[in-house]
Image (tube, helix red, strand yellow):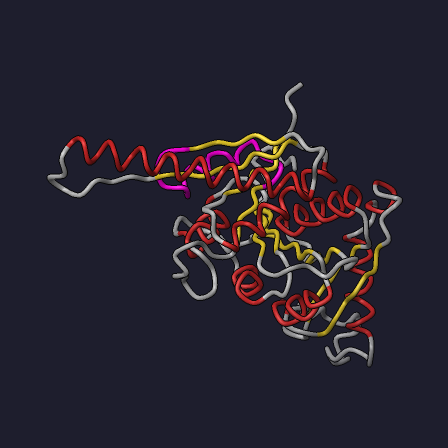
């Protein structure tokens, strides 16, 4: 049986180095192989001599091998017992990593790369993967809080169900508590006609809150039986989801969200909440798109 993989992309930058260490720890607690990927994309200037072209390719290849060697040493320094493989790929790293994500348990990247040029606060590779990868993508933004919980956003949608499954698996494998966060407002709860038409639609004080707490309990039904060793805290908060999740990320070791965007354009493949937490969360963020067969 082929060992599942945790894939991490690196370009040798400091954010990528942090991502490699995080991926190594994930591989250790998840029991997967770690595959470290560095991609080189040599495009010679027009009219360059063949000898210079070959020299440029050789130098780029040697530099890539050095990046991979250092990254492997870094990974083994934090998780000495894991199975580490390295891949020196050719071409744009975005489609390379997206293709590898098809068979990966998760794909890990830093929030920005060596160029230091980002769109907003998210690098081009991490932005591409969170919209195009087929499996979960973990973007390492800041150093997580040691011993902090895994926080997952729960709203009853299909992507949130996939995120919940990933979060429970993470907490069960790597230890620590889990916080299931459900944010709501009067605008997110559809009005229900009263049984007596003469009565107002207005709810009694606390009735909406109680209803949302019941909904959260229903959405988590069965998970405690499947993962009995995971301590779960349910939070139903009256707040906008992005603000609630970003606030919760301050003390979390990982924030997990589902990607509920739609459409063929990359910008529409992430929901607004996912985009917000990827740019502003205070801990690593896992975006879970799920798979066509529904497995994680």
Depth check, front residue: 147 or 152: 147
On the image, which quarter does residue 149 sit in? Answer: bottom right
Q: Residue furthest left?
A: 47
Q: Does the segment drawn in magenta span residue 90?
A: yes
Locate residue 69, reporting x and y percent: 52, 36
Query: Could you tell whether 183 is left or right of 51 in the image?
Result: right
Quadrant of the rendering where the N terminus is positioned? top right
Is residue 265 left or right of 134 when viewed as pictured?
A: left
Q: Quadrant of the C terminus?
A: top right
154 to the left or right of 207: left
Instruction: Say above or below: 261 vs 1.
Output: below
Residue lying at the far top of the rendered structure = 1
At 81% across and 64% down in the image, what residue appears? 213
Residue 192, percent across and down? 71, 68
Q: Nearer the viewer, residue 283 or 65?
A: 65
Q: Which residues are magenta?
A: 89-106
Q: Is residue 239 visible?
A: yes
Q: Position of residue 61 (x, y in %)?
A: 37, 34
In the rendered structure, the answer to whether residue 232 lies left or right of residue 133 reads: right
Helix, strand or loop for the magenta stretch, by majority:
helix
Q: Is residue 144 above or below residue 194?
A: above
**Who is closer to the viewer here, 42 or 136?**
42
Q: Is residue 103 located in the magenta-colored stretch of the structure?
A: yes
Q: Residue at x 11, y 39 (%)?
A: 47
């Amino acid at each position: 049986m082929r060992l599942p993989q945790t894939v991490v992309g690196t370009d040798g930058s400091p954010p990528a180095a942090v991502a490699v260490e995080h991926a190594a720890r994930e591989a250790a607690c998840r029991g997967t192989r770690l595959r470290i990927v560095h991609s080189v994309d040599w495009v010679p200037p027009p009219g360059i001599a063949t000898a210079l072209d070959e020299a440029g390719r050789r130098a780029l290849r040697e530099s890539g091998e050095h990046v991979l060697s250092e990254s492997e040493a870094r990974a083994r320094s934090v998780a000495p017992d894991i199975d580490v493989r390295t891949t020196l790929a050719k071409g744009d790293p975005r489609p390379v990593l997206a293709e590898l994500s098809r068979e990966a348990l998760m794909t890990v990247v830093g929030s920005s790369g060596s160029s230091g040029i980002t769109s907003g606060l998210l690098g081009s590779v991490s932005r591409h993967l969170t919209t195009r990868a087929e499996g979960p993508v973990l973007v390492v933004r800041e150093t997580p809080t040691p011993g902090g919980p895994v926080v997952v956003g729960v709203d009853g949608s299909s992507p949130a169900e996939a995120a919940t499954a990933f979060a429970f698996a993470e907490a069960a494998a790597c230890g620590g508590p889990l916080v299931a966060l459900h944010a709501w407002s009067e605008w997110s709860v559809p009005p229900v006609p009263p049984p007596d038409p003469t009565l107002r639609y207005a709810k009694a004080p606390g009735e909406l809150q109680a209803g949302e707490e019941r909904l959260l309990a229903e959405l988590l039904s069965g998970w405690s039986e499947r993962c009995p060793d995971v301590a779960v805290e349910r939070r139903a908060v009256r707040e906008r989801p992005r603000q609630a999740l970003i606030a919760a990320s301050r003390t979390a070791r990982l924030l997990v969200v589902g990607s509920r965007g739609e459409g063929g354009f990359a910008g529409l493949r992430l929901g607004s909440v996912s985009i917000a937490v990827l740019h502003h969360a205070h801990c690593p963020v896992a975006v879970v798109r799920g798979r066509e067969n529904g497995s994680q």
